[in-house]
Amino acid sequence: MTKTLKKVESSLHGKISVPGDKSISHRAVIFGSLAEGKTEITGFLDGEDCMRTIDAFEALGVKIEKDEQSIIIHGNGVSGLKEPERPIYLGNSGTTARLIMGVLAGLPFHCVLHGDESLSNRPMDRITVPLRKMGANIDGREEGKYLPISIRGGNLRNIQFQSPVKSAQVKSGVLLAGLLADGKTEVKESAITRDHTERMLQAFGGMVSVEEDRISIDGKQSLRGANVQVPGDISSASFFLVAAAIVEKSHVTLENVGLNQTRTGILDVLKKMGASIQVKVKDPIGGEPIGDITVSYAPLKGTVIEGDIIPRLIDELPVVALLATQAEGETIIRDAEELRYKETDRIAAVVETLKTFGADISGTEDGMIINGKTELSGAKADSYGDHRIGMMIAIASLIAKGEVQLTNPECINISYPEFFDDLAKISSTLS
Ligand code: S3P
């Protein structure tokens, strides 16, 4: 499918409530499935990735009810999980893959996992290596580097694990395995990554100790069902934050967005580049801080984005690159090599795509260099099947001088099925 997108006729105005946070939605299903008793999740993201997590736990024998308002999980504890009859399909979802491997490593049965073409080419050794050290039997393509992977788990021993990659998925997979293992498991991070697993574990009655970059968990804890309210996803909100920052005279508010410190790097970067931002902090929900964010257009300047901020905005970097094309001067993004292992190689995809729009951008091994401000032209651009590249292209079309033809827009359903409806609410471009 191809979608034709046109430049916005005037400025962007209005309010949007973005859908539920993807990372938190996945974890709510996982913890609800490991717990004893009922879990009710409201504000759940019904994007394709989170549906794969629901399917996976249903395949492991968990009863999950879905309606318009909520997801209800009837948990029977870890011992209630059963060997699946068929291989489990994980679609495009890296989070489902890395986290469920941690769970399966602790379960005394056999399971095969497979995914779509993109997921089948993403590295899984980052999680299979520590899980094998804990005692799980794992095999797979190229010795367990890639899906399909088969796991026969059970009888795990604890480890002290220093994660070589800055990845919340790896940290969470090992912590989940640690929850099912004997003894105390410790994960040391090389940079602080999103901490939704640690927070949600506590909401389900579990105990985890966090000392800066060192997280430890006692094994064999039992969890009890909980009610989880999922905040709006700041990664989804960031597309509209950037849109308001680059379309002249705009003024847009994103309501009830998660403001967890490990995720708000995009706000720091927008401020540093000169955007006008107001944050109205509200009462926390589900153990997570939230608030309304308002962005108004203001002239932008280039900046350097590097170091510890990178994991705090890793998913936002494609749209940050677009933002940088509209800032005066040079923007440098470095220390972001992880972008090469996402749904697509996001350094290559962003550079290729923004060049076709006429941007002055080049890729480096671990980032990008962008020189602005550049007037963008119309283009034919492909999403590469990557939701965040698809949404970046749609936001670029708001300021591009000619028509934009976006091929493969369907992948946006992975994290934001209502994206074009929400865009239409604040603009008058879309037919
Ligand atoms: C996620 C962690 C990040 C992020 C992904 C979601 C999570 O991946 O890019 O979209 O929910 O833990 P990595 O852990 O690979 O950095």
Image: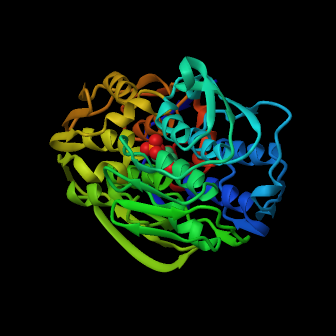
Decide: is 95 above or below 278. above
Q: Between residues 38 and 10, which one lies in front from this camera angle?
A: 38
Residue 359: percent from left, percent from top = 27, 29
Which quadrant would the N terminus be assigned to in this image? top right
Which quadrant would the C terminus be assigned to in this image? top right
Image position of 51 (left or right of 92): right
Image position of 290 (left or right of 285): left
Q: Between residues 110 and 370, which one lies in front from this camera angle?
A: 110
Coloration mode: rainbow
Q: Quadrant of residue 197?
A: bottom right
Decide: is 287 above or below 367. below
Most extreme residue toward the bottom is 283
Residue 230: percent from left, percent from top = 61, 65
Residue at 81%, 47% in the rendered image: 58
Tell me if residue 14 can be seen: no
Tell me if residue 108 can be seen: yes
Image position of 389 (left or right of 226): left
Decide: is 245 above or below 38. above
